[in-house]
Image (cartoon, grey):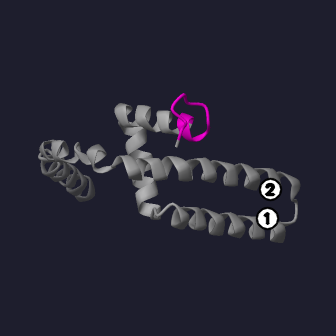
């Protein structure tokens, strides 16, 4: 009985302590504006290379049945992804943050999609 009373009290305290959190959320909304055009372009460019590296990895994994070879392939992919981010001057944290922002911000997603089209040669404004 005392365990369930404690649990009930703890849940009530948690509910009351998180009641103030929604007022803090609007302060987090400007985050999408923190990604500039140059950083979004670097992200889009790295995204295209990352997708290719992951596709190559998946293809190689499909042809390998040796666990040591699979471990080597995983390590090679990990190293390649780190190289891509260094080449594009992005940190892993920045890449993950921009990925999240693109997934939750429709306007940023549209801008990202346009950049992808342009960078992959499909856009009318592909003159870089």
What SS does tag 2 mark?
A: helix
Image marks 1 and 2: residues in contact by CB distance under 8 Å? yes
**First-in-chain label (1 vs 2):** 2
Which residue bears the numbered disc 1?
A: 70
- Give the side of residue 27 with respect to residue 36, left or right: left
Q: Is residue 122 magenta?
A: yes
Mark 2 closeness class: few <14, some 14–19, many ≥20 residues within 10 Å: some
| Above or below, comparing residue 44 to residue 88 in the picture | above
Q: Nearer the viewer, residue 125 or 48?
A: 125
Q: Which residues are magenta?
A: 117-127
Is 82 located above or below residue 104 in the figure? below
Query: What percent of the width, then of the height, locates residue 17?
Result: 14, 52
Residue, x 30% and y 44% (percent of image)?
32
| Left or right side of 89 for 65 | right
Is 77 in front, or is 34?
34
Percent across and percent down for residue 112 are 45, 38
In the rendered structure, find residue 61 and report the number of the disc placed on it: 2
Could you tell me which residue is drawn at 68 percent across and 63 percent down?
77
Residue at position x 65%, y 65% in the image: 80
Where residue 94 appears, as percent x and y from the top left, is: 41, 58
Q: Which mark is residue 8?
A: none
Magenta-colored segment: predominant secondary structure? loop
Q: Nearer the viewer, residue 101 or 49?
A: 49
Indicate the secondary structure of the residue bearing disc 1: helix
How crowded pointer 1 is (Cα within 10 Å; few <14, some 14-19, many 20+) is rated as some
Q: Which residue occupies the foreground of this view, 33 or 42?
A: 42
Residue in the image at 51% along x and 46% along y: 44
């Amino acid at each position: 009985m005392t365990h369930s009373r404690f649990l009930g009290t703890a849940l009530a305290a948690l509910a009351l302590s998180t009641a103030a959190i929604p007022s803090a959320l609007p302060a987090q909304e400007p985050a999408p504006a923190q990604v500039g055009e140059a950083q979004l372009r670097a992200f889009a460019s790295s995204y295209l290379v990352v997708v290719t590296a992951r596709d190559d990895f998946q293809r190689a994994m499909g042809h390998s049945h040796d666990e040591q070879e699979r471990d080597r392939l995983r390590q090679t992919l990990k190293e390649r992804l780190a190289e891509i981010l260094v080449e594009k001057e992005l940190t892993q944290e920045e890449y993950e943050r921009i990925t999240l922002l693109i997934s939750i911000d429709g306007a940023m997603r549209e801008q990202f999609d346009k950049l992808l089209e342009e960078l992959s040669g499909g856009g009318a404004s592909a003159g870089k």
